[in-house]
Image (cartoon, rainbow, N blue to C red):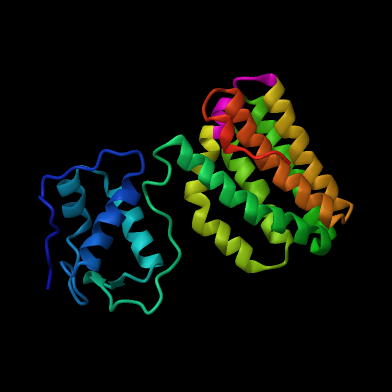
């Protein structure tokens, strides 16, 4: 059967990440039993109208729910709630990036993951992958020269490191957190772009990571990746965005 969403049908979503908010709202309905296995979601148009969002936002929210195994599409029929999965897929709180503390928390998560990724990439990267990292650096430089933040190019650089580990699980993990990383990176790069010395530091840090990977120095690669994220936090301190107590000295 089709079931309308509660809370009130006039509830509108007004935060920056509308698709995350809508997905979280539907997930909460499922968790407390307001939506049960076999129920059909309202149509894309109905959800968009009820929550004051675009149909693109609705599609993105439903995609998130599908990736978690909470709903599935039936061709020509609609989207239905599935039986509760035995294990819930990894997901971050959609409120994650509503404060600068939360942005720093994501930077910390990346530091842990990407330090090891860089170390493994130094051991395992093929010649083609090492060359790909150099091209990824060039893409960031070109975006900067165009006056852009280069967020997508920066994401591509870190994705290339994940691929160079030879472990597809790192690539999948980055895919899971990429939306949150993109928002955190937009914040940090937005502050860094205001100072030429910060931009130069970031460029040197990226090159240090690549140079260590190319040299097959796993210890140096890990250290360079960790320092890159620690220095990113320090730049936020200098910019007056976060308090000094957030960053530990190395």
At 33% from the left and 49% from the top, the residue drawn is 19
At 77% from the left and 45% from the top, the residue drawn is 224
Where residue 231 appears, x then y in whole percent? 68, 35
Where residue 63 appears, x then y in whole percent? 37, 60
Furthest toward the right, the residue is 215
Where residue 20 appears, x then y in whole percent? 35, 51
At 57% from the left and 37% from the top, the residue drawn is 246
Q: Which one is nearer the viewer's eye here, 81 or 208?
A: 208
Furthest toward the front, the residue is 245
Q: Which residues are magenta?
A: 188-196
The N terminus appears in which quarter of the rendering?
A: bottom left
Q: Quadrant of residue 240?
A: top right
At 23% from the left and 56% from the top, the residue drawn is 44
In this rendering, is residue 166 above or below 240? Answer: below
Q: Which one is nearer the viewer's eye here, 76 or 178?
A: 178
Where residue 81 appears, x then y in whole percent? 25, 72
Residue 183 within the magenta-colored segment of the rendering = no
In this rendering, is residue 19 above or below 82? Answer: above
The C terminus appears in which quarter of the rendering?
A: top right
Q: Taken as a whole, is the magenta stretch helix, strand or loop?
A: helix
């Amino acid at each position: 059967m089709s079931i309308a969403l509660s809370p009130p049908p006039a509830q509108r979503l007004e935060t920056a990440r509308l698709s995350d908010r809508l997905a979280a709202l539907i997930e909460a309905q499922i968790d407390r039993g307001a939506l049960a296995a076999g129920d059909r979601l309202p149509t894309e148009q109905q959800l968009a109208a009820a929550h004051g969002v675009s149909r693109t936002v609705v599609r993105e929210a439903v995609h998130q729910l599908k990736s978690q195994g909470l709903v599935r599409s039936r061709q020509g029929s609609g989207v239905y709630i599935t039986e509760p999965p035995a294990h819930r897929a990894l997901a971050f709180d959609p409120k994650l990036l509503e404060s600068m503390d939360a942005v720093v928390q994501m930077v910390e998560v990346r530091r842990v993951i990407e330090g090891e990724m860089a170390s493994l990439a130094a051991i395992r990267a093929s010649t083609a992958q090492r060359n790909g990292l150099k091209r990824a650096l060039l893409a960031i430089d070109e975006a900067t020269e165009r006056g852009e933040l280069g967020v997508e190019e920066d994401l591509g650089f870190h994705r290339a490191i994940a691929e160079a580990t030879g472990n597809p699980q790192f690539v999948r993990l980055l895919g899971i957190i990429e939306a949150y990383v993109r928002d955190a990176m937009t914040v940090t790069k937005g502050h860094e772009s205001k100072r030429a010395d910060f931009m130069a530091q970031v460029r040197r840090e990226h090159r240090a990571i690549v140079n260590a990977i190319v040299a097959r120095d796993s210890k140096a690669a890990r250290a360079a990746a960790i320092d890159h994220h620690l220095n990113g936090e320090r730049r936020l301190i200098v910019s007056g965005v976060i308090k000094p107590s957030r960053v530990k000295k190395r």
